[in-house]
Image (cartoon, helix red, strand yellow):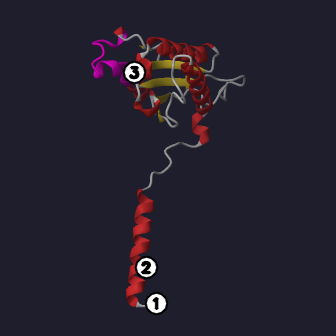
Amino acid sequence: MSVRDEEQLIELLRERDTRASRRRRPHRLEKEAYAQVGVGYCVTLCARQHGTPFADAELAEVVFVSLLHLRSTGEWLIHAYCLMPDHLHLVVSLCPGENDEEPQSVLRSLIARFRSFTTRQSWSHGMKGPLWQRDFYDHVARNPADLEAQCHYALENPVRKGLVEDWRDYPWSGSPEPW
């Protein structure tokens, strides 16, 4: 191999390494992090293809009732929620199971069930295919102040978007549980 060929090979390898380092790294925490009782989870689910399906009040009601159903089954506490026309902010904690140490359900499986159910319900409202984007954003509250800040962020979303002047006037937001 000539010196020139060797230099070209080294340059190609550097470029490959640079591209590899720019790739997105997994943004999910370890599985166990999504199964903690007493931890505040802040989740944002976006509508598929950046549409605004929740501008339809009937579909928004389906999503809202589904959230409350998982609360009534004792699987999660809802600290704050805000269903915007194109996304959902949700701040929840998992409820303990029978041994009080492990949760009754794991967050990711609850989110999957919620998305699956609401997607099926959306079909009767004229939607086709998945209602939600495949992935979702999450944040684990690090302390009580962080949890409170996340709740305020979720609740104030319709105010920031100019939909209402006070979050309490927005029909699809609330705070059923204390923070």
Image location of residue 53, percent across then percent down: 44, 22
Which residue is label 3 attached to?
85
Residue 73, label in figure:
none
Question: Residues at badges 2 and 1 in contact (C-beta under 8 Å)?
Answer: yes
Residue at the farthest bottom position? 2
Relative to 79, say whether 105 is above or below: below
> Is disc 3 placed on a helix, strand or loop?
loop
Q: Residue at x 42, y 91 (%)?
A: 2
Which residue is label 1 attached to?
1
Q: Amino acid at mark 3?
A: Pro
Relative to 123, say whether 176 is above or below: above
Question: Residues at badges 3 and 1 in contact (C-beta under 8 Å)?
Answer: no
Q: Is residue 104 visible?
A: yes
Q: Residue at x 43, y 33 (%)?
A: 49
In magenta, the rendered stretch is 151-168
> Is disc 2 placed on a helix, strand or loop?
helix
> Which of 36/46 is in front?
46
| Residues packed near mark 2 inside 10 Å, few (<14), some (14 to 19) or many (20 plus) | few
Main SS of residues in magenta: helix
Q: Is residue 168 left or right of residue 162?
A: right
* Marks 3 and 1, the one that precedes in the sequence: 1
* Marks 2 and 1, the one that precedes in the sequence: 1
Mark pair 3, 2: CA separation: 51 Å
Q: Is residue 141 visible?
A: no
Residue 9, label in figure:
2
